[in-house]
Amino acid sequence: MKHVVEMLNIRKEFPGIVANDDISLQLRPGEIHALLGENGAGKSTLMSILFGLYQPERGTIKIHGEKADIANPNVANQLGIGMVHQHFKLVHNFTVTENIILGMETKKGIVLDIKSAAVRVGKLSEKYGLNIDPCAKIEDISVGMQQRVEIIKMLYRDAEVLIFDEPTSVLTPQEVRELMKIMRNLIAEGKSIILITHKLKEIKAIADRCTVIRRGKLIGTVNVADTSEEKLAEMMVGREVSFSVHKKECQPGEVILNIKNLSVLSSRKVMGLKNISLDVRSGEIMGIAGVDGNGQAELVEAITGMRKAEFGTIFLRETDITNMSIRDRIESKIAYIPEDRHKHGLILDYSVGDNMIMKVYLHQPFSQNGLLNSHAIREHAQRVMDQFDVRSGQGPAASARSLSGGNQQKAIVGREIYHDPELLIAVQPTRGLDVGAIEYIHKRIVEQRDNGKAVLLVSLELDEILNISDRIAIINSGELIGIVNACDVNENQVGLMMAGVKRGETA
């Protein structure tokens, strides 16, 4: 069988690390080929080589059997290769059409011909079931729609091979299902897809074959239909992975966080959280379940001090923290794992060491008389990295940007847990992580509970909420629908409550 793409014996090195070590991958016509590996395994690097962003030290790339030298992404586009990056490359104050034609603008004489480009974009949207408005501004559309813009951008350039880099890491479950439908439409139209992911359920749902790489080395290529999720996980991580969270029975103690009649305005200046009361006890994990945008952000931002409470009070033990400064809340031992690790979790251009002391730099031994102690910072960061398995070729001196997504997340978890908080707020703590990292972070969160800490877990992953929470508070449109014991409900019951149906009612 003639392959659409062949990557043979590819090797790519960066200072201090071999990202791809003699890796081969072959893509058949009309197939969805998954590329599976842990965060930092070398998946994105391999595909960046195919897309012309990196040049390999050695190895051969063939397109339709012909050897190709892909010097840059323009060459990749000419060869019919397109890529949707994990972090989209869109200009937010441009329209959908302006983003799509950027770099290959159509003109009528010397004037940009936006109108005919918009017509073509509309036709592509209709043909592939993408449902995109060509005239909408990027800043006004959802993340899922932004991803569709990236897909049309590839199709507009007549791409035959489509590379998706972690396409579901920022999507809701409904958007994931829509994306899979779109992928099937693309295959039906004769395209071929490489899907970079570490989500085993999605591989089983949509991929034909799967190539697994671990720490830069090829482990093997398997037919997905003949391989179990457990086997794929074992190939990816190199050991057996437990899909269930092992935890002993909850032993709740005193109330640590007490929220009374809390109402908070959203960014749109409407009431995003309406008269909510709940408490979180020491030695328990309280899960917050709800469809994205139903008040979770307002709740977390009110507790952490990033958003003002309009009404109601928030107590940490006996102390009213409703109007307390963010610094004082941190000093009161509130730890916070934010939803967006790039926007709120790390300063990407700072070193890992500097990021590790972000909340404690005012204290000795990290600073004295206004001067930072670099030796103490480095030692502290190394301890956190060792304890929380944060991998970096350059240790604490590495920039946070250079770490893989999983290692960035473990660095944040390590920083927040290391200083022994009373209350740990974890928002989407495993978003975009592989099964090995998910298992690890779940274990550390449960460990906090077992050490008598209070944990507030906010997640859009229902199985995560059901697996590690002791109690679950369900919110819909900013209102508390109910609080249930995790062991007394199933996914369907919680899903109905997320849709606004109270227990005992019928949908």
Image (tube, rainbow, N blue to C red):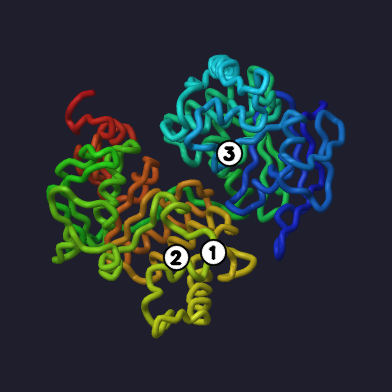
For mark 2, give the secondary structure.
helix
Q: Which residue is mark 3?
A: 228
The residue at the point 37 percent across, 71 percent down is: 419
The residue at the point 32 percent across, 38 percent down is: 293
Amino acid of disc 1: Val
Looking at the picture, does residue 131 appear above or below residue 302?
A: above
Mark 3 → mark 2, Cα distance in angstroms = 32 Å
In which quadrant of the rendered view does residue 189 lie? top right
Q: Are marks 2 and 1 in contact (CB under 8 Å)?
A: yes
Q: Is residue 180 left or right of residue 273?
A: right
In which quadrant of the rendered view does residue 296 lie? top left
| Crowding near the residue tagged with mark 3, few <14, some 14–19, many ≥20 C-alpha atoms within 10 Å | few
Amino acid of disc 3: Ser
Q: Which residue is mark 1?
A: 390
The residue at the point 18 percent across, 58 percent down is: 322
Amino acid of disc 2: Gly
Query: In the depicted view, which residue is nearer to us: 183 or 219?
Result: 183
Mark 3 → mark 1, Cα distance in angstroms = 29 Å
Q: Which mark is residue 414?
A: 2
Residue 185 visible in the snapshot: no
Residue 292 coordinates in the image, percent (x, y): 35, 38
Name the mark nearer the viewer: 3 or 1. 1
Residue 435 coordinates in the image, percent (x, y): 52, 49
Q: Earlier in the sequence, mark 3 or mark 1?
A: 3
